[in-house]
Amino acid sequence: MDCWHDEIEAAESEDDIVRNACEYLLLWAPRELHPHTLGLYDMRVRSYLDIESVNIHLADLPAAGDSRLREIGDYFWHAAARISEIRYEAKLLPPMVPAQRVPSQSPRPRP
């Protein structure tokens, strides 16, 4: 399902990713996969917090688990990473640079 990963890369906002994640989950009928398996109340993604929650929940499961969970885990990891990129680009996250020195309040005497 590479097309779903392409949609993540093409997303320009968190809302785009949330909407795509909700559509992605619709592919997994509740009779195939219970929402609690993903750490969700129902098979809906309402915000980026749900994406983070599923990502963390699936990362905590054993690696030798169900191949469906690995596929969903890969998708939600990618979605969470893309949201981080978008937030960084929009300056919603602080840049990863060393702290700047704050100038002192009193001016230095000139030589």
Image: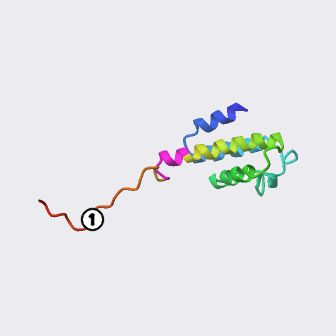
Q: Is 109 located above or below residue 10 in the figure?
A: below
The colour scheme used to paint the residues is: rainbow
* Image-based side of 38 in relation to 18, left or right: right
Q: Is 8 located above or below residue 35 in the figure?
A: above
Residue 6: percent from left, percent from top: 64, 33
**Image quarter hosting the C terminus:** bottom left
Residue placed most toward the observer, 24 or 55? 55
Residue at the far top in the pictured view: 2
Q: Mark 1 points at which residue?
A: 104
**Image quarter hosting the N terminus:** top right
* Image-based side of 69 in relation to 101, left or right: right
Residue at the far front in the pictured view: 111
Q: Residue at position x 70%, y 46% from top?
A: 22
Q: Quadrant of residue 99?
A: bottom left
Secondary structure beneath label 1:
loop
Residue 57: percent from left, percent from top: 73, 53
Q: Residue at position x 54%, y 41% from top?
A: 12
Q: Residue at position x 78%, y 45% from top?
A: 63
Instruction: Check if residue 90 falls in the magenta segment.
Output: yes
* Image-based side of 6 in relation to 62, left or right: left
Residue placed most toward the observer, 7 or 87? 87
Residue at the far right in the pictured view: 31
Instruction: Check if residue 21 falls in the magenta segment.
Output: no
Residue 36: percent from left, percent from top: 81, 55
Q: In which quarter of the image is residue 103?
A: bottom left
Residue at the far bottom in the pictured view: 106
Q: Residue at position x 78%, y 40% from top?
A: 27
Q: Give the range drawn in magenta.
A: 85-93
Q: How many labels does the image show?
A: 1
Q: What residue type is labelled 1?
A: Ser
Mark 1, Cα crowd under 10 Å, few <14 / some 14-19 / many 20+, is few
